[in-house]
Amino acid sequence: MQSLLPAMQSVHQALLDLGLAGRVNVSTAHSVNILATSYPPSAGAFREDLAQYIQPLLNFHAEVGSPFLVNAYPFFAYKASPASVSLPYVLFEPNPGVRDPATNLTYDNMLYAQIDAVYAAMKAMGHADITVRISETGWPSKGDDDEVGATPQNAAAYNGNLMKRIAAGEGTPLKPAVPVDVFVFALFNEDMKPGPSSERNYGLFYPNGTPVYNIGFDAASFSPSPTTSTFSSSSRPTVTKKNLNFILLRNFEYANLSFIEQRELLMAMSSLIVLPEKISVRCNG
């Protein structure tokens, strides 16, 4: 931790020297567990044992205009207390919501409540001038017997509903004019990752490139052009948002593609992701 801020300062100085500081942010990702209190959101506070590290980081973010990054997974809260945490509340599904008595703001999902709790924690440390971004969030499609809620249906609901809100430019109840900015974890399942089953099943796609579930691409309405059963160099269709899922649903094995074909497939998939005008560099301590 003691080396983290100096590393961020060094990276920022290098960007300044290259004339890129206006285009590239320097930040670091934090677990939402750095909060000692997150409910109600207005009572958000950082852990006392981390305050000595967080305060100078906040000062740095405010000075250079970079965002505060948080990894937040409502899945963990639901898994820990499925009897008391509402599933619709964590999946962005219709629900009565939860009212913050101090602000009278109503939250209809846990992720936005967690974001506003971070805003409250930063304000308590003297900073209302830093934007919060979600550097990781997601929902596993499979888990162990004790990992309640880890299903393809819930994963599709969480990521799909979240993407609809992001596309609408929605902000949180506390910051309605500041669109929520997230990175969804993850693109692929990680079959060899250690730990509980859920850790291997956050991906939108299997390692062979086929979708685990659908969060918006509609294969039913596709009128496929060439009868392409593999993503081959000799007969490769033009990849667009409309036909990408059709290509992926064909019975090919990602591992059997050549390196160039794998690269082109990944580039085609990534081309559908809209990147921000300003890039963030994340330093991990």
Image: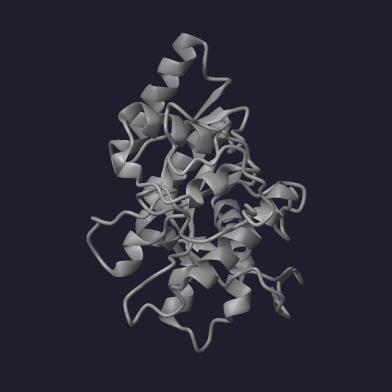
Residue 54 appears in the figure: yes
Q: How many numbered markers are drawn?
A: 0
Q: Is residue 139 above or below residue 275?
A: below
Q: Is residue 39 above or below residue 45?
A: below
Q: Is residue 95 above or below residue 17?
A: below
Q: Residue at x 31, y 54 (%)?
A: 190
Residue 285 appears in the figure: no
Quarter of the figure with the N terminus: top left
Quarter of the figure with the C terminus: top left
Please name the colour scheme applied to the rendered image. Answer: one colour
Q: Is residue 63 above or below residue 93?
A: above
Q: Quadrant of residue 6?
A: top left
167 to the left or right of 88: right
Q: Residue at x 48, y 69 (%)?
A: 152
Front-lying residue, 74 or 22: 74
Q: Residue lying farthest top?
A: 18
226 to the left or right of 234: right
User: Residue 75's spot in the image, x, y percent?
Assistant: 47, 70
164 to the left or right of 80: right
Q: Quadrant of residue 130?
A: top right
User: Residue 261's spot in the image, x, y percent?
Assistant: 39, 31
Q: Residue at x 40, y 27 (%)?
A: 9
Q: Residue lying farthest bottom?
A: 83
Q: Residue lying farthest front?
A: 227
